[in-house]
Amino acid sequence: MKLLHIIATTRGEESRTLSISKEFLKTLNEKHPHVEVDELDLSTTELPAVLDTNVKAKYLLMMGGQLDEATQASWKKVSDLAEKFISYDLYLVTAPMWNFSVPYMLKHYIDVIMQAGILFSFTANGPEGFAKYEQMVCITSRGSDYSPGSPMHALDHQEPYLRTVFGLAGIEDIHFVHAQPLDVAPGLTQTALAKAKEEARQMVDKLNITTPV
């Protein structure tokens, strides 16, 4: 099995979110050392623009058209990223909350890879995702508490967005670990981080990971 770790934080080793993901990956390696882990750090990855040529290519292909040589070269950067994404069995998304949602580099990446014909198709019954049997873990950090029942819960546009957009690709088995609140008081920060790290370690046992015979 192969796991793609999508990192959407700009703080590197200082990232609180990444520190939680490392606990998940450490436990995963201890219990399932056969799982291959690849890392995609969006803070250092140059993503193709979803503009002009690539937008034209997208709609031309959706209508059954053919790309010319120049357009093919530009579109290949998009299709390569989308095809690489769909080649994995497991996904780990490391993403702090930015302005009630996801960091811009993660949104950019999603806009690049979410392509009809590669991650999903349009059918008479609506979109059908091609990643139906894949699993995803999203590890986030939030300054405030956005848990159900809290005053801030209605402002959580991060989890609903990630569930919806990756659901378009067919991924319905999505688990979340939220570290929150992290910016209210120092004492609460350390407690929330410790709790999230323990949840991340336990999350490994909730996944359906096959062991090679």
Image (spheres, rainbow, N blue to C red):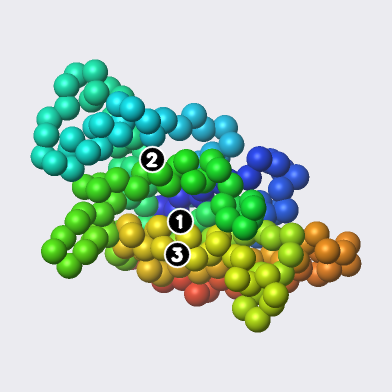
Q: Which residue is mark 1?
A: 91
Quarter of the rendering containing residue 24: bottom right
> Tag 3, which secondary structure?
helix
Q: Say if 187 sits above or below 102 in the image.
A: below
> Tag 2, which secondary structure?
helix
Q: For marks 3 and 1, give the one nearer the viewer.
A: 3
**Residue at image location 34% in from the left, 48% down from the top:** 114
- Mark 3 Cα within 10 Å, few/some/many (few <14, many 20+)? some
> In the image, which disc is placed on residue 163?
3
Residue 61 in the image: state x and y as whole percent. Answer: 18, 38
Give the residue type at disc 3.
Answer: Arg
Give the residue type at disc 1.
Answer: Tyr
Sequence-first tag of 2 and 1: 1
Q: Say if 152 sits above or below 76 in the image.
A: below
Disc 2/disc 1 C-alpha distance (Å): 17 Å
**Residue at image location 33% in from the left, 59% down from the top:** 168
Sequence-first tag of 3 and 2: 2
Left/right placement of residue 201 relative to residue 90 reads right
> In the image, which disc is placed on residue 112?
2
Give the residue type at disc 2.
Answer: Val
Sequence-first tag of 3 and 1: 1
> Tag 1, which secondary structure?
strand
